[in-house]
Image: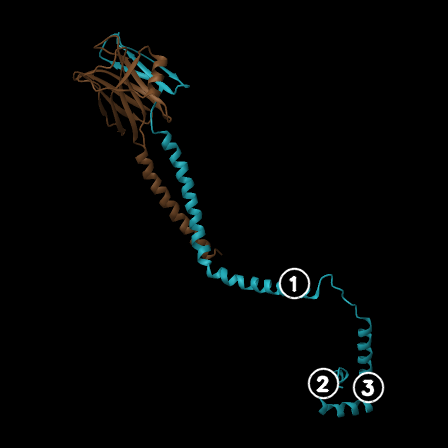
Chain colours: A cyan, B brown
Amino acid sequence: MNRELQLKLQAHLDGELPPAELGDITELLAHDQDAKALYMELQATRELVRGNELALKLTESREFYWSKIAREIDRNERTQTAPNRTRDFSWLRRWVLPLGGVAALTVLLAIALQAPSSSRSGLRLAEASELETTVDDTSMNSFRSESEGISVIWISSH
Amino acid sequence: MIKRSTLRFSLVSLLSLLWATMGFGLTETRAGDLRLKTQLIWATDEEKPKEKKLKEVESKLADKLRRFYKWKNYFEVSSTNVVLVANVPQKLTMSRKCEMELKRVDEATIELKFVGEGKHIRTVRQKVKPLLQGEYSIFGGDDKEKDSDAWFVVISQAGP
């Protein structure tokens, strides 16, 4: 018995066989023992499945259960289409983001380089000094007050 | 194998950094010139002469000077913003008879030359450190014309 006949026996059992073929299959079952054995086996299997199928009880309403499935399908579809959108903005990832990073680095460099130069924008008098004079009796002394933020060199010519 | 996008990113980064380095190099050179405010101050116990156009020294500085010196009044004779370029002297007129030349010799040394009636009187070479905002570097001395008075040259950071 070929596969086509097996499928026709299954269709007959399910009541899906076209009326034109019904006569041939009924005659086959009447005379072919293999066909009849297969038919009876399929029939027994169907009865077994029908009688022992587990009933699934939902904890929520039927509508809510199916709406969850619908939402999940919808979400999956959106996830699958997302890469296309990303591809549309791929230039952003390739150019703008690296340039943004470089710009941030540049700003940091600017801050790092500007800080010491701004602190050099003046001259605080240090301790050591050197005096060259054409006038006698000239003396020089210095002091610094950290609290007042002043450094003084006093030149006395007396 | 290096991805093309990675190579492009590296090239852009390198060019940007090169630009940034060159740009800041120029800024640093300009920043090497010091912008300073110099004030010539006359210290005296006398009241402000009516015939002279003198300005009272700002209270913050005057109070600091009063804490260390005996004089009651401090008048600003002149105030000048100077850009101190290395080895280029800046002339400051203290009075009709007296001038001062301020020069930056190197990163850590300044030179102050006092000239009286066209003759060199004295030169002070002074080691310097970075001056912080709000600090003052002060040169002072007795007034040769009037023993009881004094002069001060105050150096501070020039305003923006």
Measured Cα–Cα span from mark 1 to mark 2 = 40 Å
Q: Position of residue A155 (x, y in %)?
A: 29, 13
Q: Amino acid at mark 3?
A: Lys
Query: Decide: marks 2, 3 in contact (CB < 8 A)?
Result: no
Judged from the image, the secondary structure of the residue bearing numbered disc 1 is: helix
Q: Amino acid at mark 2?
A: Glu
Q: Amino acid at mark 1?
A: Lys
State whether discs 2 and 3 lie on one chain: yes
Identify the residue at horizontal 70%, vertical 66% (top origin). A62
For marks 3 and 1, the one nearer the N-term is 3
Q: Position of residue B158 (x, y in %)?
A: 31, 28
What residue is shown with label 3?
A36
Identify the residue at horizontal 56%, vertical 63% (top origin). A78
Judged from the image, the secondary structure of the residue bearing numbered disc 2 is: helix
**Circle count:** 3
Q: Position of residue B143 (x, y in %)?
A: 24, 11
Q: Residues within 10 Å of mark 3 (few under 14, many from 20)?
A: some
What residue is shown with label 2?
A4
Q: Which mark is residue B29?
A: none
Quadrant position of residue B71:
top left
Q: Looking at the image, which is closer to me, A1 or B114?
A: B114
Tell me, yes or no, if residue A128 can be seen here. no
Q: Given this view, does label 1 or label 2 mark the residue nearer the observer?
A: 1
Tell me, yes or no, if residue B137 can be seen here. yes
- Compared to A80, does A147 lie above or below? above
Q: Looking at the image, which is closer to me, B34 or B16?
A: B34
> The disc numbered 2 marks a residue on which chain?
A
Judged from the image, the secondary structure of the residue bearing numbered disc 3 is: helix
Query: Decide: marks 1, 2 in contact (CB < 8 A)?
Result: no
What residue is shown with label 1?
A68
Q: Position of residue B52 (x, y in %)?
A: 20, 17
